[in-house]
Image (cartoon, helix red, strand yellow):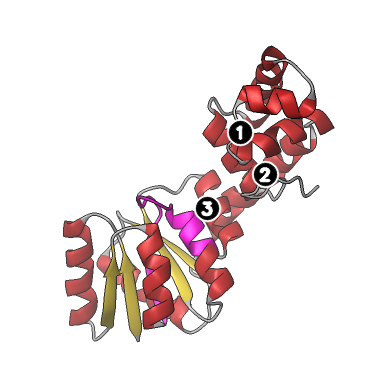
Amino acid sequence: MKVLLAEDHKIVRQGTRLYLESMGVEVVGEATNGREAIELAGSLQPDVVVMDIHLPELTGVEATRRIRHDYPDIRILVLTAYNEPAYVHALLDAGADGFILKTAELSELFKALNEVAIGRKAFDADTLARAEKHIIGMKAQIEGLTDRELEVLAHAGSGKTNKEIGKLLFISDRTVQGHLKNIYQKFGVTTRTEAVTMGLQHGFITLEGTNES
């Protein structure tokens, strides 16, 4: 089995490599950020990428999404310190094949790695159940957005400022801010970045800021 490690913390990356190699796994490369993970996945063609969720330059979620799109035969096991439903939902949506906590035993990592390598999923039932409940709740919240709020969110997703959005939609900066506040409240978030991330995860906007609903 050929594995690519994508982890920005050197001590974690080296420790994981030593363990996997001791178990007979061939570690073919190491990436320290999301963009490098995508590049190495393409050039090295590993069987599995062990991906950290929090990577510089490009998050593990977005790197997972792009690898799944560009190299569908490569399996992806996410290694993270977080198991909140929102994270799991994002990983499922991105196409991850498995999820393992950094607090897990090394033997659990090896077991999950073998599961995804043969085409199985490595998500425990409780984690999936909580993620499904979260998805249902978020769907109801997102469906509560007005057409105008979706337009504002789409333009925010493309990186436009409130002033630029206002000019495009022929509304004032203050009105744009009001729409954003309503979006934050409906999503249960507090920042523009979190709101845009929610929109991307649920397919209502794309990285180009277009509305897909």
- Which of the two labelled residues, at mark 3 and mark 1, occupies the earlier sequence position? 3
Residue beneath disc 1: 160
Asked if the magenta segment contains residue 156, the reply would be no
What label does residue 209 carry, if any?
2
Residue at left offset 79%, top offset 32%: 144
- Image x and y of residue 132, in percent: 64, 51
Can you tell which of label 2 and label 1 is closer to the viewer?
1
- Pointer 3: residues within 10 angstroms few (<14), some, or many (20+)? many
Can you tell which of label 3 and label 2 is closer to the viewer?
2
**From the viewer's perspective, is residue 69 above or below residue 12?**
below
Can you tell which of label 3 and label 1 is closer to the viewer?
1
- Image x and y of residue 1, in percent: 35, 87
- Which of the two labelled residues, at mark 2 and mark 1, occupies the earlier sequence position? 1
Q: Give the residue type at disc 3.
A: Val
- Image x and y of residue 15, in percent: 17, 65
The residues bearing labels 2 and 1 have C-alpha atoms spaced at a distance of: 9 Å
Residue beneath disc 3: 88
Q: Give the residue type at disc 2.
A: Gly
